[in-house]
């Protein structure tokens, strides 16, 4: 049955949030992170995790942290109109994002990305935040998701991941 996006409830992960039933067969790492590290990281101020419920069921989550991007990576792939660019740019890091088995392909990821961008725009009003950054798995489906949901651009690649960014000054914001 299709998910009614209007019924999604977003909230910050709480100590009492039951994450034990979350299943993400695409990535044991994402499932394990939510179950064993998300709450600890939050207490240690490393990242903050937001959960998405549909009724009582936990169906998705994303984690955010602060980050930066080396100017060299950005300057090689993007045209930025700056006379004297910094050595690195401030960025909101989308550290993790996952949707529960059985709920993918129904717009939940797109809704989470809208929340991420909304938070990024809020940050730009309070502190410096030029980009949203993700270190994406080298998986064509994952790369397409980020390109389609935000217009992320590849700026750097290593053995494990592809660093992708969105310049917040290039996105319309209400």
Image (spheres, grey):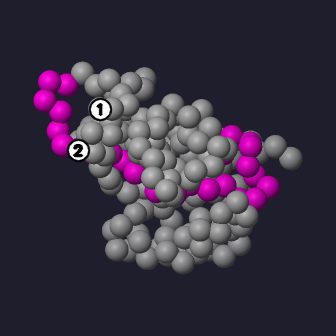
Q: Is residue 57 visible?
A: no
On the image, which quarter does residue 146 sit in? top right
The magenta stretch spans residue 87: yes
Looking at the image, residue 147 sits to the left or right of residue 7; the answer is left
Q: Residue at x 49, y 74 (%)?
A: 37
Query: Horizontal and vertical percent for residue 126?
Result: 24, 43
Looking at the image, residue 108 sits to the left or right of residue 164; the answer is right
Q: Magenta span covers which residues?
A: 82-111
Q: Looking at the image, is mark 1 or mark 2 nearer the viewer?
A: 1
Query: Horizontal and vertical percent for residue 82?
Result: 19, 25
Q: Residue at x 42, y 62 (%)?
A: 48
Nearer the N terminus, badge 1 or badge 2? 1
Q: Is residue 60 visible?
A: yes
Residue 132 vertical position relative to residue 34 in the rendered view, above or below: above
Q: CA distance from mark 1 to mark 2?
A: 10 Å
Question: Which residue in the structure is indicated by mark 2?
Answer: 88
Res 75 label: 1
Q: Residue at x 29, y 49 (%)?
A: 68
Q: Residues within 10 Å of mark 1 (few under 14, many from 20)?
A: few
Q: Secondary structure at mark 1?
A: helix
Looking at the image, residue 37 sits to the left or right of residue 21; the answer is left
């Amino acid at each position: 049955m299709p998910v009614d996006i209007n019924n999604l409830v977003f909230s910050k992960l709480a100590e009492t949030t039951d994450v034990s039933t979350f299943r993400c067969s695409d990535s044991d790492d994402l499932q394990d992170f939510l179950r064993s590290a998300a709450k600890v990281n939050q207490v240690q101020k490393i990242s903050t995790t937001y959960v998405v419920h549909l009724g009582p069921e936990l169906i998705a989550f994303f984690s955010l942290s602060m980050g930066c991007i080396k100017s060299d990576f950005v300057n090689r792939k993007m045209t930025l109109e700056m006379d004297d660019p910094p050595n690195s740019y401030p960025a909101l890091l989308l550290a993790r994002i996952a949707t529960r088995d059985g709920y993918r392909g129904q717009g939940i990821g797109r809704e989470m990305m809208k929340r991420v961008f909304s938070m990024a725009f809020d940050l730009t009003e309070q502190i410096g935040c030029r980009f949203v950054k993700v270190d994406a798995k080298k998986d064509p489906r994952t790369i397409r998701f980020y390109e389609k949901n935000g217009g992320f651009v590849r700026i750097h690649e290593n053995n494990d991941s592809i660093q992708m960014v969105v310049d917040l000054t290039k996105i319309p914001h209400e």
